[in-house]
Amino acid sequence: MTTGSLTTRAAVPSDASQNAAQATARAVDLGPLPEWDLSDLYAGLDDPAFARDLAAVEAECRSFAETYRGRIAAIAGSDDAADTLGSAVAAYEAIEDRMGRLMSYAGLVYSGDTTDPARAKFYGDTQERLTDASSDLLFFTLELNRVDDAVIDAATANPPLARYRPWLEDIRREKPHQLSDEVEKLLLEKSVTGRAAWNRLFDETIASLRFPLRGEDLTLEPTLNKLQDPDESVRRDAAEALSGVFRANLRVFTLITNTLAKDKEISDRWRRFADVADARHLANRVEPEVVAALVEAVTAAYPRLSHRYYRLKARWFGRETLAYWDRNAPLPKVEQRTIPWAEARETVLSAYTAFSPRMAEIARRFFDGGWIDAPVRPGKAPGAFAHPTVPSAHPYVLVNYQGKPRDVMTLAHELGHGVHQVLAAGNGALMAPTPLTLAETASVFGEMLTFRRVLDATRDHRQRRALLAAKVEDMINTVVRQIAFYAFERKVHLARREGELTAEQICALWMSVQAESLGPAIRLDAGYEPFWAYIPHFIHSPFYVYAYAFGDCLVNSLYGVYQSAEEGFVERYFALLSAGGTKPYGELLAPFGLDARDPAFWQIGLSMIEGMIAELEAMDA
């Protein structure tokens, strides 16, 4: 998320062939880059097994509804409730697994090239048919939530239903916000032409953008990568190219943002959520006051973290301030080299092995099994992700690898997700998914393990400073920037309740949170205003972003426990990951002596970042 082939890969569109050739040439120094092999799911878009499974799951959904609709209350109150209801949940879970396999395959194929019409149609058709099929399942959780708590508690006291108690408790948290069966079905079926359609428009628009830069028309990822180029003029030109193209497309991005924010407001109002972020907090199984404490702690730390670090970085460049395109620039007078894929693989696996051979063995399966897609390609989804698919299969990882040190850390991050997903899969399709409060734990921890191993092996003073500075920047991007993103989203969604927003209004909200979070040492020159437009989390997962800060601060605390060399840490860590969604985050953190509900908890993680900045300052003393 070795070398595999994407058997459903379509030919590169003719208008992108030149860019593809240039990208291939630039990738020569990286060595062979793997492309994932999706045949563990299906052999191709025209695989008869895909068509058979899709037809079968539609029939299974209809049969399930015919068997159980309108009978859940009676079954739950019967003498054999544990057996009968347990069988019903098991059947529901099996259907969910098959549907997940189908949708995962369609989504992964689509992410490989979102500009390919054949893939887009395949993805859209699959989504429509599965949404229609799942409407026959919608009654199940709604009827379960109408059963009295005491009756459900009695039924879950015995196997086989007892196994699903965590899932049943989880869905009952949604009870105050569920609507009538008819309204829920309407919302589900219209999601294909509503939120999902706007999400797809965003993805395809982003993938189709081309940024003119020094005689080339680049896609988003290579252009963003230029912001880390050693040559300041290249960074400036890349920033201007990004700004110009974003601004030229602001009408579309503004319409998408306005529409989705209004869509969310309607849903929140019908479901009786008071705050714009309450639905996300519920989905994350985290108390709003815990998130508020995190946000307050990080915001108060801006001067001690980002403001302080960027002042230091500006001094390294011999300036009072840095232009926004220099924020992630490599340090001056430090050799920049391209890291081949084979070295990146070895770096991550050796770091994982030092912590736990078992962790490295799971990660190695991603390389050896064709579970990773690494090259930058026109149309490919930007960024990086680890997709869990379903417990009956295995995860896949997507990265856009370009040989930068940050790309190695991204690989370590996504493989951490992958290891987590493999370990949690044993809980089954209903309980394998991990709430976002802990979803970033393994990824950030894996990244920290890799960073520490690289740092410990580096002796050159300048290289050590560059590594430490890069880690501080990553942590600022993960903590400070994501909380600023959260603040921006809140401002946008609250302002949207008063009426439609213009592009200029959204840009102004963006600049206000950026100035506050980055501090006076970063000069937000004209052109930075539309940089909110390309961030996918705002579109796909409103208010997701605070999970990164939550995870980073949590892992900083967790890593401190690990450094104390407490006996049994590795075993407790694997138990945490293996739990998936079966336990609340507080219960999983308790064995480590950590309590995220304590406001002082966040200071532990923030202090680690502050300590690294102090270490950098001492290097210059």
Image (spheres, helix red, strand yellow):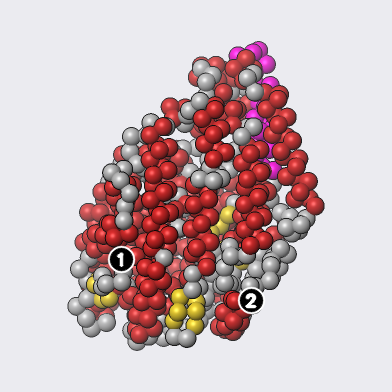
Mark earlier in primary sequence (1, 2): 2
Residue 461 appearing in the image: no
- Check residue 337 in the rendering and tell me which mark sits there, or answer none: none
Q: Are marks 1 and 2 in contact (CB under 8 Å)?
A: no
Task: Give the foreground label among 1 and 2.
Answer: 2
- Residue 616 vs residue 181, the one in the foreground: 181
| Amino acid type for the residue under numbered disc 2 | Ser
What is the secondary structure assignment of the residue under circle 1?
Answer: helix
Magenta part of the protein: which range?
A: 77-98
Q: CA distance from mark 1 to mark 2?
A: 33 Å
Assess whether residue 79 is covered by the magenta stretch.
yes
- Pinpoint residue 430: horizontal percent, then vertical percent: 60, 38
User: Residue 462 falls in which quadrant of the image?
Assistant: bottom left
Magenta segment main secondary structure: helix
| Amino acid type for the residue under numbered disc 1 | Glu
Furthest residue in direction right, as rendered: 48
Residue 296 appearing in the image: yes
| Above or below for 77 versus 544 | above
What is the secondary structure assignment of the residue under circle 2?
Answer: helix
- Residue occupying the point 56% across, 57% down: 386
- Residue occupying the point 63% across, 54% down: 123
Residue linked to disc 2 = 14
Assess whether residue 529 is covered by the magenta stretch.
no
User: Residue 242 falls in which quadrant of the image?
Assistant: bottom left
- Residue occupying the point 30% across, 46% down: 499
- Check residue 529 in the rendering and tell me which mark sits there, or answer none: 1
